[in-house]
Amino acid sequence: MTARTGRAVVLLVALGAAAAGCGGEPGRTPSPSVPSTAPPAETAPPAETASPAETSPPPSTPGSPESASPTRSRDLVAGRYQPLWPFADAAAAEAWRSRHREDGADAWHLDPARTAVRFARDHLGFREIDRAVKTDLDGAHARVHVGLTAEEGPRPMVAAVVHLVRYGKGADAPWEVVGTDDTTFSLTTPEYGASVGSPMTVGGRITGVDESIRVQVRRPGGGKALGEHCCVGAGGEKSPWSAEVTFKPAPGTTLTVVASTGGHVAEVERFAVTGVTVP
């Protein structure tokens, strides 16, 4: 769901085709919106390669964050990621940092696990998601496996792998949610960082049985969803799903598109998000 994965897809597709032509086994081909072939998140979320250094963003390509307008590019996290939550822009992140240096307020911004759980529970409204099952740190990047405890099993279920990046430089730079990593449920459309309008086509792929997918469009800062579509029936192995959602645009903002499914053991058992912009 993040921009990093999108740049890897072209190379991986090419490598897979080459291997097949030589009698080898094709490689995996994940994209920012296309699910990897890793097993379900609740059993073994997919491993991620190291994130590129913040100071060396990849070349700009059409639709990537780097091709955004000069005004928008100032607010990209680490120069390349969409700021989804909790800060709407770089100025808000710096304002919090100044306050925290004075009085230590809202220290949870310095904890990626707490930030990820709050994102799912408070911003997206998924109240059953109440814990960080696992946290993987890699410099300024964090992947937090957020989930819940199901009565049917002894281990927590992982609903999503939330990707966070420090918004700014230094040890006291706060963590910002920038997307989710694909598992058995993905959002392939719209592209990460795409400029969108209403109505908007949303879609992806899912592995599951008797799934019911809800799509919402959320603004920075929380509050009521700008638009919602419920629900899309889906199921099968890496099966495509799609929906059209109408929403009230908020010009000049970054919006979070979230798709969720559940209903077997919890209301929300898996979710995926991507970030888009409204011109």
Image: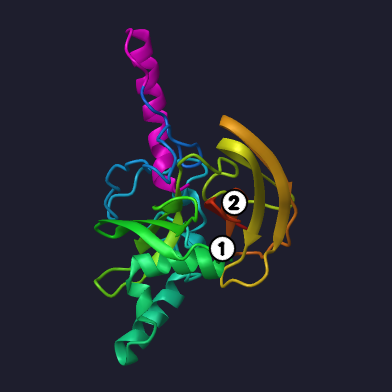
Residue 191 included in the magenta stretch of the image = no
Q: Which residue is mark 1?
A: 126
From the viewer's perspective, tell me whether residue 36 is left or right of residue 275.
Answer: left
Which residue corresponds to the image point at 40% horizontal and 53% vertical from the top-left? 154
> Is any atom of residue 128 visible in this view?
yes
Q: Which residue is mark 2?
A: 260
Residue 124 or 211: which is nearer the viewer? 211
Work out how far the residue at label 2 is from the one at label 1, CA to CA, in angstroms: 9 Å
Range covered by the magenta-colored residues: 1-26
The x, y position of residue 235, in whole percent, is 62, 34
Examine the image and state in which quarter residue 238 appears.
top right
From the viewer's perspective, tell me whether residue 181 is left or right of residue 15.
Answer: right
The x, y position of residue 207, in whole percent, is 54, 35
Q: How many marks?
A: 2
Label 1 sits on a secondary structure element that is: loop
The x, y position of residue 104, in whole percent, is 32, 87
